[in-house]
């Protein structure tokens, strides 16, 4: 890892991207919480409040960057790299991943496995710095281990 100095605006961009990712993940839970039970209704209310609060924080961070760094945008670091990676995973759904201001932190690795709104399981992978890929996992009846993986870009 190099000693490249990361500017204040890049750190704010990174924090805003993490908040956006968290809000998106919370919103993705919403369709699964549509049961009429009281417990689910309360959970849904809490989710809506958490999502709204994260949106408020994200907008505040964007405002701070706009105020102190008016000549810069929130979508790219000073180096020109994207702040947020976006990967289409199912129809109009996308997975969001904030790239770290230090490029060396975004080495190839598996990030996580997600379940899409239609129930498809996808393994999200950083295939190279700045590049997201997914692998669709399929299962045999009664077996929770993936039996076939198909890479998608």
Image: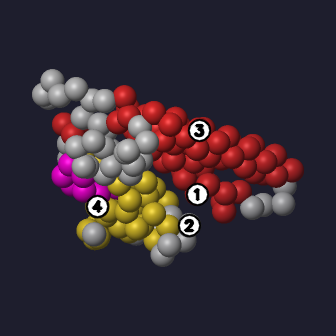
- Give the residue at mark 1: 28
Q: Picture quarter containing residue 8?
A: top left
Q: Which residue is mark 4?
A: 133
Q: Nearer the viewer, residue 88 or 40?
A: 88
In the displayed structure, does residue 37 sit left or right of residue 2?
right
Foreground of the two, 33 or 61? 61
Report the span colored magenta. Answer: 124-132
Give yes or no for contact between labels 3 and 4 (Cβ–Cβ under 8 Å): no
Element under disc 1: helix
Disc 4/disc 2 C-alpha distance (Å):
18 Å
Nearer the viewer's eye, disc 2 or disc 1?
1
The answer to whether residue 10 is seen in the rendering is: yes
* Mark 2 lies on residue: 117
CA gap between label 2 and label 1 equals 8 Å
Main secondary-structure element of the magenta-colored stretch:
strand
Q: Residue at x 58, y 57 (%)?
A: 28
Q: Is residue 145 magenta?
A: no
Tell me if I can see residue 139 in this picture.
no
Q: Are marks 2 and 3 in contact (CB under 8 Å)?
A: no
Q: Residue 127 vs residue 9: left or right?
A: left
Q: Residues within 10 Å of mark 2 (few under 14, many from 20)?
A: some
Residues 90 and 70: in front is: 70
Q: Earlier in the sequence, mark 1 or mark 4?
A: 1
Residue beneath disc 3:
60
For marks 4 and 2, give the one nearer the viewer: 4
Q: Secondary structure at mark 2?
A: loop
């Amino acid at each position: 890892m190099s000693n490249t100095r990361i500017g204040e605006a890049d750190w704010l961009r990174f924090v805003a991207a993490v908040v956006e990712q968290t809000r998106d993940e919370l919103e993705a839970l919403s369709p699964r919480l549509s049961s009429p039970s009281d417990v689910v209704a309360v959970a849904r209310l809490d989710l809506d409040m958490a999502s709204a609060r994260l949106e408020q924080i994200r907008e505040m961070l964007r405002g701070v960057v706009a105020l102190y760094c008016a000549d810069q945008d929130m979508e790219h670091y000073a180096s020109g790299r994207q702040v947020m990676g976006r990967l289409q995973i199912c129809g109009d759904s996308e997975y969001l991943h904030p790239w770290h201001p230090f490029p060396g932190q975004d080495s190839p690795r598996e990030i996580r496995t997600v379940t899409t709104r239609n129930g498809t399981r996808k393994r999200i992978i950083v295939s190279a710095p700045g590049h997201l890929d997914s692998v669709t996992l399929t299962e045999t009846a009664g077996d929770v281990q993936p039996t076939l993986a198909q890479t998608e870009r």
